[in-house]
Image: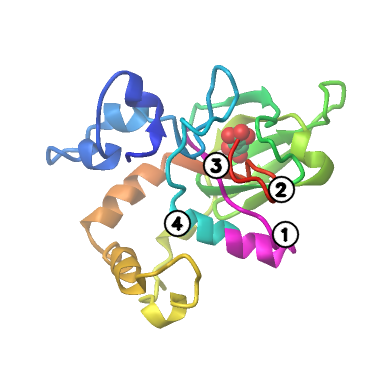
C-alpha cells in the first residue's frame, strides 16, 4: 500500500494491492501472486543498494512499535526501525544467498519476523567459504541478526508447508485500548484497536486465511542511521 514501494509498481499503479485483489467478488489470484516484496521507510534500492533521503517514506508505526518492544526486551534500547523489506513467498519461492550491508549502521541488529508457511533458512559466514547451517523458521518466529551474524550470508532455499496453523487460533480476545495506550507510537489507541478487532471472524479474515495457507510473509527490519545521525 502506498507510500510503501512494491515490486509490482513498475507494471501497474495500484493504491492498495490487497483491496485491488478483491475489487471484484472473486479473488484475483494472479495479482495476489505477483506481489513479491514491499519496502518501507528508507526504501531499499535493489540496483545501487544505497539508501537515500529522496527515496524514503514514513516507517509504519505498528511495525516500529513491535520492533521497539523486541529491541528493548533484548537490551538494544537505542534501536530505531528505519527500513524494512517485506518478502512474500509462495510454496515454490526461494531467496538466494546474500548479505545485508546497505545500512550505514551495521552495529544495530536486524529483526526478521516470519508468518505463515515455514522456511528453511541457511546462514553461513561473512564470506562463502563457511558451510551454512540450516534453521527451520516457523510462523511467529523472529530471527535476530546481530554482532558477527549481522553480516553473514543467508538464504531461503525452501518453503515448507507449516505443520501447525497458529493463525487459526480461535482464542483471539478482543484487544482493549487500555492495553495498548502506553505504547509510545500509538497516539489514537481507539482507532488502532478498531482496525485490529474488525478482522475477527469475518470475511476479511477468511481472505487472509486463504492467502497465508499457501504463503510465507517475512518482514525484516533494519536501523539505517548511526545513533546521532539524522539523515544520510
Ligand atoms: O525470508 C527470510 O527469512 C529472509 C529474508 C532476507 O534475508 C532479506 O530480505 O534480506
Please report contact status of discs 2 and 4: CB closer than 8 Å, yes or no: no
Q: Which residues are magenta?
A: 68-90
**Residue 115: x percent and y percent?**
51, 49
Dot 3 falls on a residue whose secondary structure is: strand
Q: Earlier in the sequence, mark 1 or mark 3?
A: 1
Dot 4 falls on a residue whose secondary structure is: helix
Rounded to the nearest angstrom, the CA distance separating label 4 from label 1 is 18 Å
Q: Is residue 70 magenta?
A: yes
Mark 1 lies on residue: 76
Q: Crowding at label 2, few (<14), some or many (≥20) Cα neighbours within 10 Å?
A: some
Please report contact status of discs 4 and 1: CB closer than 8 Å, yes or no: no
Identify the residue at horizontal 56%, vertical 46% (top origin): 82
Q: Disc number at residue 109?
A: 2
Mark 3 lies on residue: 83
Q: Earlier in the sequence, mark 4 or mark 3?
A: 4
Q: Disc number at residue 61?
A: 4
**Residue 73: x percent and y percent?**
69, 67
Q: Crowding at label 3, few (<14), some or many (≥20) Cα neighbours within 10 Å?
A: many
Along the line of sight, which residue is nearer the eye, 8 or 64? 64
In the picture, the quarter occupied by the N terminus is top left
**Residue 122: x percent and y percent?**
72, 33
Identify the residue at horizontal 60%, vertical 65% (top origin): 69
Amino acid at each position: 500500500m502506498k507510500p510503501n514501494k512494491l515490486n509490482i509498481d513498475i507494471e501497474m499503479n495500484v493504491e492498495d494491492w490487497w483491496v485491488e485483489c478483491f475489487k471484484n467478488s472473486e479473488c484475483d489470484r494472479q495479482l495476489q501472486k505477483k506481489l513479491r516484496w514491499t519496502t518501507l521507510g528508507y526504501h531499499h534500492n535493489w540496483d545501487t543498494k544505497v539508501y537515500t533521503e529522496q527515496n524514503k517514506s514514513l516507517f509504519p508505526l505498528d511495525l516500529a512499535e513491535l520492533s521497539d518492544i523486541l529491541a528493548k526486551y533484548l537490551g538494544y534500547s537505542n534501536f530505531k526501525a528505519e527500513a524494512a523489506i517485506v518478502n512474500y513467498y509462495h510454496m515454490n519461492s526461494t531467496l538466494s544467498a546474500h548479505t545485508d550491508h546497505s545500512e550505514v549502521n551495521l552495529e544495530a541488529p536486524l529483526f526478521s519476523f516470519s508468518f505463515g508457511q515455514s522456511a528453511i533458512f541457511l546462514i553461513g559466514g561473512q564470506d562463502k567459504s563457511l558451510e551454512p547451517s540450516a534453521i527451520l523458521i516457523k510462523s511467529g518466529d523472529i530471527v535476530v541478526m546481530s554482532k558477527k551474524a549481522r553480516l553473514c550470508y543467508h538464504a531461503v532455499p525452501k518453503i515448507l508447508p507449516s505443520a501447525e496453523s497458529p493463525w487459526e487460533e480461535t482464542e483471539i480476545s478482543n484487544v482493549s485500548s487500555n492495553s495498548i495506550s502506553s505504547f509510545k507510537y500509538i497516539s489514537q489507541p481507539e482507532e488502532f484497536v478498531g482496525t485490529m478487532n474488525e478482522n475477527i471472524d469475518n470475511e476479511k479474515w477468511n481472505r487472509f486465511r486463504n492467502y497465508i495457507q499457501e504463503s510465507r510473509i517475512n518482514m525484516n527490519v533494519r536501523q539505517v542511521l548511526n545513533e546521532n545521525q539524522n539523515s544520510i
